[in-house]
Amino acid sequence: MATLRLIIILTLSFTATVISVTGHNITEILNEFPSYTSFNNYLTQTKLNDEINRRETITVLVFNDTVVSEYLSGLDISVVKNALSVHVLLDYFDLPKLQTIGGGSVMTTTLFQTTGEAENGAGFVNITDLVAGKVGFGSGGSGSKLNALFSRSVKQIPYNISVIEITSPIIAPGVLNRSQPLDVNISSLLEKSGCKTFAKLISDTGVLQIYETTEPRGLTVFAPSDAAFNAASLPDFKNLSNNDLISLLLYHALPVYVPKGSLLTVKNPIGTLATNQVQKFDLTVRTNGDSVTLDSGVDNSHVESTLLDKVPLSIFKIDHVLIPAGFFPHSPESAPVKSPESSPPAPVVPITAPVSTPVQVPVHGPVAASPAPVARNSPVKSPPVSSPTTSSPVAGPAPADSPDADTGNNDNNNSSGGVKASVMFLALVTVAVSGMISSVFG
Ligand SMILES: *[C@@H]1O[C@H](CO)[C@@H](O)[C@H](O)[C@H]1NC(C)=O
Ligand SMILES: *[C@@H]1O[C@H](CO)[C@@H](O)[C@H](O)[C@H]1NC(C)=O
Ligand SMILES: *[C@@H]1O[C@H](CO)[C@@H](O)[C@H](O)[C@H]1NC(C)=O
Ligand SMILES: *[C@@H]1O[C@H](CO)[C@@H](O)[C@H](O)[C@H]1NC(C)=O
Ligand SMILES: *[C@@H]1O[C@H](CO)[C@@H](O)[C@H](O)[C@H]1NC(C)=O
Ligand SMILES: *[C@@H]1O[C@H](CO)[C@@H](O)[C@H](O)[C@H]1NC(C)=O
Ligand SMILES: *[C@@H]1O[C@H](CO)[C@@H](O)[C@H](O)[C@H]1NC(C)=O
Ligand SMILES: *[C@@H]1O[C@H](CO)[C@@H](O)[C@H](O)[C@H]1NC(C)=O
Ligand SMILES: *[C@@H]1O[C@H](CO)[C@@H](O)[C@H](O)[C@H]1NC(C)=O
C-alpha cells in the first residue's frame, strides 16, 4: 500500500496546468489583502477561482477570515463550494451601480444557480439599496433576510470584475445542510450512467482501487460510454497485456480535481494517471463555447455529460475511448520519441512497467472486439517478463545499450525491454501492482 501511495505521489507531480482565458486572476487580486487569505484559499481548493477567472462581467462578494472561520470551518469542502458560489454574482456591481439600483432592489443570478443544485430561489441574491446609503444583500431563497451589508470596495476592473467586501455571509436556504461527506460508489454510478463496460474493466484490473486511493487528493475520471466501447473504429485491445490495459484505464483519469469550469480553462496538455517520466500519456483539451473535446493525439473524444462534480471528485462521460499516442504500435503517431544518444534512463515508469503477474489478462467478454479489423491490431503476448516470481526483474542486469524503457508499446518482443530502467524501482512497482491485482482476483 505504501508503494501504491508512492506511485500516486509520483504521478501527482505531473499535474495539470490551468491557465485563464480572461484578463483577471482572482487569486492574484485577493493575494494583496491578507484578511482574505482563507477566502482565497477556499476559492482555489474548490476551483471556483477558475470559474471566476474564465467569466467576464462578474462580482465576487468576499468576507474576512474571521467571518470565514465562523461560517465555514468544519464544513465539508463540497458544501463550502456551494456556499461560496452563492457569493459570485454573474453581473458587474461597483458602489456607484449599487447606489443607483432601479427601484431600489434587484435580484441577481449567482454561480450557484448554474450548478443545477439551487432550489427555491437559492441561486439568486437580492441586493437592496437601504436607507442612509447602506446596501443590503440577502439570499433570493424564500424567507431570507437582507443580513449582509456592503462593507467596502476591494478591487474593480470595470466592467470585468468587481470584488466587494460584505459584513456577513449570504446564507442560501438548504446550502449548509448537505454536509454529508463524499461517499460515492464509483462503480455503481458508472453502471447506472451507461458506462458498464468501463466500470467492469476498472474493477477487474484493480484500477478502481488506484482511483479510490487517489481521490482524497483530487480525481477526475473520463468514463467512455458503452457505445464508445462498441465503436467499429476502436483498435482491438482485447489482446492487450494486463499492463497495457491498466495504462489505458489510468489514462482515463487525472490526479487532480478538475470540474467542468476548470476544464474549460485548461490550455496546456494535462498529465493523466498514466503519465510517467518516460511517456507523457497526456491529454489536450479543446473547447468550443461550453463544449469540451479531449485530444489524445490519436483521436478526439467529446465530453457528453458531467456524471458527478463533488469536490474532490469529478466524473465525466465521454463518447470515445481515449487511445494515447504511440499506444498501438502501428499507428502513424506511434513513432517513439526516443533519442538514440540519450541521457541516462529516466527513473521510471510506475504502472506501465512490465509486470510479472500470474494473473491472466482480465478482459472477459464485455470489451467488444471491433468487427472491422483495424490495421493497428497489436500482436500482444502475455507480459514479457515470464518468471512468476515478482523479484525476477531485479535478477537481470540492465542492458546498457538502449535507454528506452518500453512502456506503452506492445511491439516489445524482447523480454528484457522492461529491465532497462531503474531496476529497484521496477521491482517495487512490480510487487505493488501484482499485489494489487491478486488482491482483486482474490
Ligand atoms: C493566478 O495567480 C496566482 C497567484 O499569483 C498564480 O499562482 C496562478 O497561476 C494564476 N493563475 C492563472 C490562471 O494565471
Ligand atoms: C476585460 O476582459 C476582456 C476580455 O477578456 C479583456 O480583453 C480586457 O483586457 C479586460 N479588461 C481589463 C481592464 O482587464
Ligand atoms: C429583496 O428583499 C426585500 C426585503 O425582503 C424585499 O422587500 C424586496 O422586494 C426584495 N427584492 C426583490 C427584487 O425581490
Ligand atoms: C471582519 O469583518 C467583520 C464584519 O464586517 C468585522 O466585525 C470584523 O471586525 C472584521 N475582522 C477583521 C479582523 O477585520
Ligand atoms: C436545512 O436545515 C434546516 C434546519 O437546520 C431545516 O429547517 C431545513 O428544512 C433544511 N433544508 C433542507 C433543504 O434540507
Ligand atoms: C459499489 O457498487 C458495486 C456495483 O454496484 C457493488 O458491487 C459494490 O459492492 C459497491 N461497493 C460498496 C463499497 O458499496
Ligand atoms: C487475440 O488472441 C487470440 C487467442 O490468444 C487469437 O486467436 C487472436 O488472433 C488474437 N487477436 C489479435 C488481434 O491479436
Ligand atoms: C520483433 O518481432 C518483429 C516481427 O514479429 C520483428 O520484425 C522485429 O525485428 C522483432 N524485434 C526484436 C527486437 O526482436
Ligand atoms: C533481446 O535483447 C537482447 C539484448 O539487447 C539481445 O541479446 C537478444 O537477442 C534480444 N532478443 C530478441 C528476441 O530480440
Image: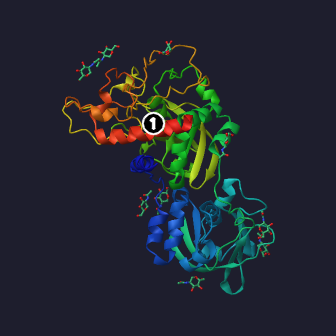
Task: Determine the residue located farthest toward the right in the rendered image.
Answer: 143
Task: Determine the residue located farthest toward the front in the rendered image.
Answer: 389
Asked which secondary structure carries label 1, the reply is: helix
Q: Is residue 163 left or right of residue 181?
A: left
Q: Which of the two residues, 218 or 299, is positioned nearer the viewer here?
A: 218
Q: Is residue 43 left or right of residue 195?
A: left
Q: Which of the two residues, 403 or 100, is positioned nearer the viewer here?
A: 403
Q: Amino acid at mark 1?
A: Ser
Measured as percent of width and height from the top left, residue 109 is found at: 68, 61
- Whether the residue carrying mark 1 lies under 8 Å from ligand 7 is answered with no
Measured as percent of width and height from the top left, residue 139 is found at: 72, 69
Q: Is residue 244 left or right of residue 139?
A: left
Q: Which of the two residues, 289 or 284, is positioned nearer the viewer here?
A: 284
In terms of image quadrants, where is residue 196? top right
Relative to residue 410, is residue 155 depicted above or below?
Answer: below
Decide if residue 176 is in sight here. yes
Residue under label 1: 434
Measured as percent of width and height from the top left, residue 375 is found at: 45, 15
Q: Residue visible at 67% across and 75% down?
A: 100
**Colouring of the image:** rainbow
Tell me the quadrant of the picture where the C terminus can be found: top right
Relative to residue 109, is residue 266 depicted above or below?
Answer: above
Relative to residue 235, is residue 168 depicted above or below?
Answer: below
In terms of image quadrants, where is residue 304? top right
Measured as percent of width and height from the top left, residue 289 is found at: 57, 44
Q: Residue visible at 40% across and 32% down?
A: 355
In terms of image quadrants, where is residue 68? bottom right
Q: Which of the two residues, 237 or 286, is positioned nearer the viewer here?
A: 237
Relative to residue 155, is residue 225 depicted above or below?
Answer: above
